[in-house]
Image: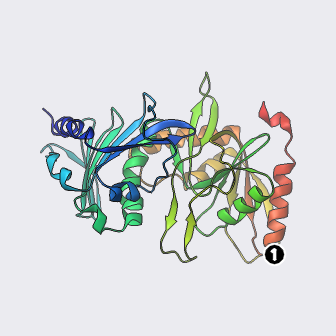
């Protein structure tokens, strides 16, 4: 039996002894995490949005995360003919067939079954390590790979909803996404996400680009901008919306004059690709590129510059978004 298949067979025998949490993506129970301790669930960085008895979607992503004594019961033999796909900064990823084998900073190991969209993470004594570190640098890269295999593209971006549809707000760290989102939400916009959204094509012909809420805490224990925590949505959350507008923030330049420029499809796609999760494999990046191209071909994109006068920025953007008519829903 192939090493990866043997490991998953062993994990199936363990699952009945584990706690299970089901999470929603866009309002659907599409992610299931099995764990053997409170520490591993805390380290996922996820916010449970469904009770433990909920029935997952049939195509749900499944992750077994073991951080206690049961971790030793999962075999982690890597086939000799596995090829290296990434080896840098303490992370080694090797693949063999549908299985991706990971070694993470000398403290964790993983096996991802890309065909069935499932993974095993083994991290002995997980409770001894910083949970934010585990979430961002071990759990999230594995989850992002599985999300992409399930048709999603993870974006470092915020999402709001107006009566005519959804708006993605993307920008580098410190560009003012959170400040802009909070002001727009206080002004009546619906809330999807402050820092991370998922995008996927849907519809009968697959020609509608939707963005989806993701049940992830935003937890940066240390940041040049101070502590940033969003434990609950600031308003009743919206699960999904068709993407109609994209705002690309240039950053908080000390320039008083606010500039709003329409951006063409090619430039919009190139800029938005910078905000796609960096955790994807080469084949995933190709799929993400196609998705982003389609998204920027159907949505209107604007480049926003100038945060020297925050009040003026908020007024200009609010006026821009408020100027779109209801016929954008078509």
In this orientation, which residue lies closer to the viewer: 261 or 192? Answer: 192
**Screen quadrant of the C terminus:** top right
Res. 132 visible in picture? yes
Q: Position of residue 161 (x, y in %)?
A: 72, 46
In the image, 131: left or right of 176? left
Q: Position of residue 246 (x, y in %)?
A: 70, 49
Q: Position of residue 156 (x, y in %)?
A: 55, 55
Quarter of the view holding residue 31: top left
Q: Secondary structure at mark 1?
A: loop
Q: Is residue 122 above or below residue 265?
A: below
Q: Is residue 121 above or below residue 131?
A: above
Q: Position of residue 189 (x, y in %)?
A: 76, 51
* Residue ID for mark 1: 256
**Screen quadrant of the N terminus:** top left
Which residue: 73% across, 78% down?
254
Which residue: 24% across, 62% down?
125
In the image, 270: left or right of 167? left
Badge count: 1
Res. 89 visible in picture? no
Quarter of the view holding residue 52: top left
Which residue: 63% across, 40% down?
240
Quarter of the view holding residue 16: top left
* Crowdedness near tag 1: few (<14), some (14–19) or many (≥20) residues, C-alpha within 10 Å: some
In the image, 44: left or right of 184? left
Q: Is residue 8 above or below residue 273?
A: above
């Amino acid at each position: 039996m192939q090493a990866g298949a043997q490991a998953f067979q062993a994990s199936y025998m363990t699952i009945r002894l584990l706690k299970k949490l089901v999470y929603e993506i866009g309002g659907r129970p599409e992610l299931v995490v099995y764990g053997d301790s409170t520490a591993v669930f805390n380290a996922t960085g996820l916010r449970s949005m469904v009770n433990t008895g909920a029935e997952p979607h049939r195509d749900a992503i499944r992750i077994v995360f073991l951080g206690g004594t049961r971790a030793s019961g999962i075999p982690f033999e890597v086939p000799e003919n596995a090829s290296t796909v990434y080896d840098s900064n303490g992370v080694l990823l090797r693949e063999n067939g549908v299985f991706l084998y990971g070694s993470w900073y000398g403290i964790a190991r993983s096996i991802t079954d890309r065909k069935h969209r499932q993974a095993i993470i083994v991290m002995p004594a997980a409770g001894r390590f910083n949970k934010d570190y585990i979430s961002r640098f071990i759990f999230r890269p594995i989850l992002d790979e599985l999300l992409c295999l399930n048709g999603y593209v993870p974006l470092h971006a915020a999402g709001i909803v107006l009566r005519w549809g959804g708006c993605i707000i993307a920008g580098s760290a410190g560009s003012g996404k959170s400040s802009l989102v909070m002001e727009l939400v206080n002004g009546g916009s619906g809330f999807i996400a402050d820092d991370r959204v998922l995008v996927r094509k849907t519809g009968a012909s697959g020609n509608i680009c939707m963005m989806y809420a993701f049940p992830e805490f935003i937890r940066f224990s240390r940041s040049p901008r101070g502590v940033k925590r969003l434990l609950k949505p600031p308003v009743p959350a919206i699960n999904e919306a068709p993407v109609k507008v994209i705002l690309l923030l240039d950053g908080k330049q000390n320039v008083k004059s606010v500039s709003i420029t329409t951006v063409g499809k090619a430039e919009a796609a190139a800029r938005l690709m910078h905000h796609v999760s960096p955790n994807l494999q080469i084949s995933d990046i190709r799929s993400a590129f196609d998705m982003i191209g389609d998204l920027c071909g159907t949505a209107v994109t604007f480049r926003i510059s100038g945060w020297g006068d925050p009040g003026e920025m908020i007024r200009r953007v609010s006026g821009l978004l408020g100027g779109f008519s209801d016929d954008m829903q078509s």
